[in-house]
């Protein structure tokens, strides 16, 4: 058995593991860092939907380095850890062992499939969206020769995949389980607009029903479709289960690391487990929301990267009192030519989930000025605001590509605890070819509408 | 003489006056508000460059309503105020008088022309960029039939106009007075990239020389070109003086309102003059920078709109302790297909102007992910950071259209006094078709580079 030692051992090299190792190295240039990754090749997770259609075209185009700049002097090995001796700080993989001073779990997530459907996973033509090059290639090759595709799940992965398949002429049906698509990220008024683009693109949406069975009517182990709760049967050659992910914490649990809610590894605001030498970052952690710190199921690579930066820079001591004070669920996607983005809480859920009274300020403006500028289109901003403190708790935006960064401005306003009065008087750059008008910048106008509501 | 009365009288209906009136009305729905504007029609100020080329094509396409939504119950009249009795709160215009409770100066700015060139302003073919529909139409009509154009001034108005004229086949020379264009907003490394696009588009740039005389060699009152300090003469049919603006404060000065530096009306952080019933907003005010509150010559419609919101909401009492705590000079423009944006201080000037020791963190990444995504291009972020507190003092960005909103995120970071540690751990939405990768989001990476520098 080969023996090795390092200062910081990171298990997993997705966005969380890669970023954590890089930041740890920048903060601690003299420390020896080893990253163990499961696969030689890996995909940029959020690019997976785009390999199925024309956007990326091939699985190869979605490949990523493991997030580690080549010249950073971080050791990266393909290895599956089988066991860890927490007390003696040794990890075992393949035929080797490695001792460490600090350990980081970045083991990610694996597809979640409802118990009642798990026995159908081995039917030919049934797939999950695992973050695994071979499985994604298999789905792409298989679907190339098929025409009828069912996507189960109407979250952003499901919708992005459905749109890509529709774009190459497939007959796509999404079975959602909620009246409107994307219902975790958006209020129904916004989700309806997204849904219209999806159905106009030829994707069928079944919202108020749900899959109870995956059908193999000939008993030949080849899928034929799905059966819904209503009794309706929808035929298909390919069934893709995009029904979310769950933390991959089997190893952590086995070696005695405490888990939190939803099976994630319990961590404090600096991503430390109960053992202060052991960290966990990314989808394998038990996440909390930013308002009441209630458990959150949000899984986003950008959240993982933020956690990884906190952990990587705090690994030999906390440097800055902020940490990861809960996920703000910040998210964007492009459906057809329209961008939809969301941060913080939604209005449909704010009151129920957090018991915070809130009001809404919204404004429909344009993304260029004056309206005759080429490329001008509508931009709609909706803010969810704490009725009494005026703090911005959430925002949703519809518009052109610029919305991808406007949501990050809204995210920063939320993370900073700023109020609508602060937004009202904020200074923004406005330019005819790039933004709305200084007089009618939609985000600021939405804040003003919220102020009007608060003061009335 | 007609007599009238109102609660709030606003003189001027540009971005500052229009926004101030709107916000005052929203905050005080029962107050009678009157806005006096000088012209029946007005242009969106920052759209003026685009009427000369193909972007907007006509002056009519640059016209704007005066910033007042039609149904807001605000009275708007075309009127030039001749005098104000401050003590008795009465303003005189045309053949009328109007009494007021609160008064807002929003009289804007007028072109600044160096004393030595003023006598040439009445030559045929010499123009300034006044915010006046008739004058802009005159310049457009006149230049339609001419080929050789000199733009004096290499600020953003000058460069945007030069690029528009070059785009319709004119022979354009910019005389800048500084080695690189846009030298107030950008460090020389960034300005050089902008300059390359401008000169590649066929615009000639004369940087290290300056205009000392406007030439009328035939003595027929028609311009022939300019003479430079070096003795060189450049021929031209049209000379456009884009050499900045100065506060339009003749009326305020005449009626005894105190002025501050650079001829602007002195105001406090809530845009109140020394007389607390009298406010001033926009380009007619004496602006301050955000670090040491040193005098600032920045004139931007977006700054004016922010001031107007502070004034409009504070007109019957301060509602929120923030006010206008100095301009952050936040600005963006598109040159060719590339967007350049800046906020806060530049590195070339930070140390000199504010005596703050600072460091730089920069990162060159991409604006999509992975790199195979259609539309992927470089995105470069440079942050100017206080060496000891880590606060972000300035940022400059080069990239695609998304930069128009990224700079607003940087502006909010600066206005909020956040440090690079805060930026490092901020949560951003990342999406393959819209933004850089979660692992390499350029703004966050630039903050990390600054941290590396601070800690080394």
Image (cartoon, coloured by chain):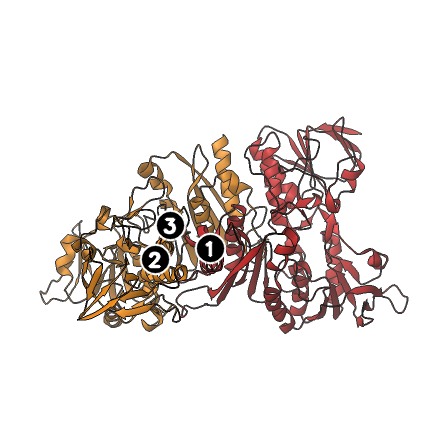
Chain colours: A red, B orange
Q: Chain of mark 3?
A: B
Q: Report, in whole angstroms, how far the alpha carbon at label 3 lies from the one at label 1.
A: 29 Å
Q: Which mark is residue B301?
A: 2
Q: Can you give x and y, in whole percent of width and height, for residue A163 in the image?
A: 65, 66
Q: Report, in whole angstroms, how far the alpha carbon at label 1 lies from the one at label 2.
A: 16 Å
Q: Nearer the viewer, residue A364 or A369?
A: A364
Q: Can you give x and y, in whole percent of width and height, for residue B220 in the image?
A: 10, 67
Question: Tag 3's secondary structure?
Answer: loop
Within 10 Å of disc 1 (Cα), the crowding (few <14, some 14-19, many 20+) is: many
B413 sits to left or right of B163: right
Mark 1 or mark 2, whichever is nearer to me = 2
Q: Can you give x and y, in whole percent of width and height, for residue B252 in the image?
A: 21, 55
- Residue at 8% across / 65% down in the picture? B219
Q: Report, in whole angstroms, how far the alpha carbon at label 3 lies from the one at label 2.
A: 23 Å
Mark 3 or mark 2, whichever is nearer to me = 3
Mark 3 or mark 1, whichever is nearer to me = 3
Residue at the extreme left: B219
Q: Chain of mark 2?
A: B
Q: Nearer the viewer, residue A260 or B100?
A: B100
Q: Can you give x and y, in whole percent of width and height, for residue B240 in the image?
A: 23, 61
B221 sits to left or right of A111: left
A294 sits to left or right of B87: right
Residue at the extreme right: A219
* Both labels 3 and 2 in a single chain: yes
Q: Which mark is residue B405?
A: 1
Tag 3 residue: B318
């Amino acid at each position: 058995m080969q023996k090795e030692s390092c200062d910081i051992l990171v298990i997993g090299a997705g966005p969380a593991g890669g970023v954590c190792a890089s930041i740890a190295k920048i903060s601690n240039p003299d420390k020896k860092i080893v990253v163990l990754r499961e696969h030689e090749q890996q995909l940029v997770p959020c690019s997976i939907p785009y390999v199925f259609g024309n956007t990326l075209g091939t699985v190869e185009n979605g490949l990523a380095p493991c997030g580690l700049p080549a010249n950073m002097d971080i050791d990266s090995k393909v290895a599956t850890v089988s066991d860890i001796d927490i007390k003696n700080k040794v990890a075992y993989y393949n035929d080797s062992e490695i001792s460490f001073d600090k350990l980081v779990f970045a083991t990610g997530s694996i597809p979640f499939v409802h118990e009642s459907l798990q026995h159908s996973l081995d039917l030919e033509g049934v797939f999950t969206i695992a973050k695994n090059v071979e499985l994604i290639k298999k789905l792409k090759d298989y679907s190339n020769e098929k025409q009828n595709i069912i996507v189960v799940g109407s979250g952003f992965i499901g919708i992005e995949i459905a749109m890509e398949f529709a774009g190459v002429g497939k007959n796509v049906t999404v079975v959602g389980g909620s009246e409107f698509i994307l219902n975790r990220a958006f209020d129904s008024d916004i989700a309806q607009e997204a849904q219209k683009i999806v159905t106009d693109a030829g994707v069928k949406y079944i919202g108020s029903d749900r899959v109870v069975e995956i059908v193999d009517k000939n008993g030949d182990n080849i899928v034929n479709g799905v059966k819904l709760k209503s009794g309706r049967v929808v035929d298909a050659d390919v069934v893709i289960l995009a029904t979310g992910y769950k933390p991959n914490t089997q190893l952590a649990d086995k070696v005695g690391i405490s888990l939190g809610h939803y099976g994630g590894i319990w961590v404090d605001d600096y991503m430390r487990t109960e053992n202060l030498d052991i960290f966990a970052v990314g989808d394998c952690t038990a996440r909390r929301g930013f308002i009441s710190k209630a458990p959150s199921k949000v899984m986003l690579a950008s959240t993982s990267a933020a956690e990884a930066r906190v952990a990587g820079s705090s690994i030999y001591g906390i440097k800055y009192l902020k940490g990861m004070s809960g996920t703000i669920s910040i998210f964007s996607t492009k459906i057809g030519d329209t961008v939809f983005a969301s941060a913080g809480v939604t209005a449909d859920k704010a009151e129920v989930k957090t018991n915070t009274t809130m009001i809404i300020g919204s404004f429909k403006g344009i993304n260029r000025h004056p309206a005759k500028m080429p490329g001008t289109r509508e931009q709609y901003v909706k803010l969810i605001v704490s009725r009494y403190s005026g703090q911005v708790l959430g925002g949703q935006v519809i518009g052109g590509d610029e919305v991808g960064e406007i949501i990050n401005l809204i995210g920063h306003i939320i993370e900073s605890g700023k109020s609508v009065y602060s937004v009202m008087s904020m200074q923004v750059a406005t330019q005819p070819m790039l933004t709305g008008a200084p007089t009618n910048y939609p985000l600021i106008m939405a804040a003003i509408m919220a102020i009007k509501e608060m003061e009335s």
